[in-house]
Image (cartoon, helix red, strand yellow):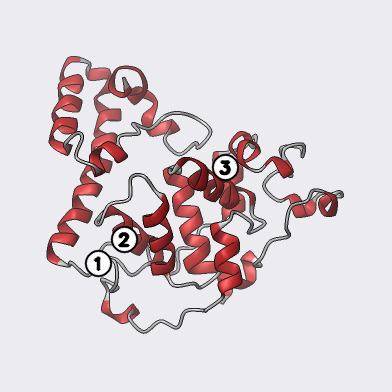
Amino acid sequence: RFLEDLVADYPNERDIPAREATSRLSPHLAFGEISPRQVWHAAMAIAHHAPGKAASIDKFLSELAWRDFNYNQLYHREDIARVPMVAKYAHLEWRGDEAALEAWTRGRTGIPIVDAGMRELWETGTMHNRVRMLTASLLAKNLLIDWRRGEEWFWDTLVDADPANNPGNWQWVAGSGLDASPYFRIFNPVTQGERFDPHGDYVRRWVPEVARLPDHLVHQPWQAPEARRLGYPAPIVDLKASRER
């Protein structure tokens, strides 16, 4: 169904969490219900018979290749969930903020798109890929909490968590993995929310406390005149100050 109906729009819509634009194959890949080779050959067959979809399918297959890259790392490094793949980050001093970690796990950080993702995770066992990056970046970069704590939470709650992609992607966000995002790349969840969820459809679904706010405030409800009456927490971290730190 994905290859027939959705793949053509995949490059443009895969980052929009309110839309069903991804394959949703990851749990089935993780449990071996379908193999990456089956996915690869089915996609290539569609590209051959429908050349107009070929570019979109190429983007989709690049994500399948990224999955394989993580498995290649695991093959060579069985300690991928415990040890930074780049050795110079092995002794980074993380903050031991248990209250912040709990707020993150419960979707109570005060940053709507992060909280939406964490609540979606808890309720459904999955989370949109773009939002996974935002939630992970907030934990490891802004809160400076050890990425392994986040990896453990995802391992316990994601239905598609596997021993290669879960730690491999966490290390990518943290900046300690092979071919990782640079350590200084810190996602701004407010601007990311405004870009990929411009009308707040995703946030409103999972964070009903802010559902009645206008579009321009739904990703930064602390700016709303009625902020104290929303029943929603203030941000647990200053994004600018923590970025500079």
Q: Which residue is under mark 1?
A: 80
Residue plotted at (44% across, 53% down)? 133
User: Which of the marked residues, 3 or 2, is nearer the chain's N terminus?
Assistant: 2
Residue 33 x, y percent position in the rendering: 20, 35
Q: Which residue is under mark 2?
A: 167
For the question of whether residue 59 can be seen, the reply is no
Residue 231 x, y percent position in the rendering: 78, 51
Q: Which residue is under mark 3?
A: 195
Q: Name the quarter where the N terminus is drawn.
A: top left
Inter-mark Cα distance, 2 to 1: 6 Å
Contact flag, marks 1 and 3 (Cβ < 8 Å): no
Contact flag, marks 2 and 1 (Cβ < 8 Å): yes
For the question of whether residue 84 can be seen, the reply is yes
Q: Name the quarter where the C terminus is drawn.
A: bottom right
- Please name the amino acid that badge 1 sits on: Ile
Depth check, front residue: 153 or 171 = 153
Residue plotted at (53% across, 33% down)? 18
Inter-mark Cα distance, 1 to 3: 32 Å
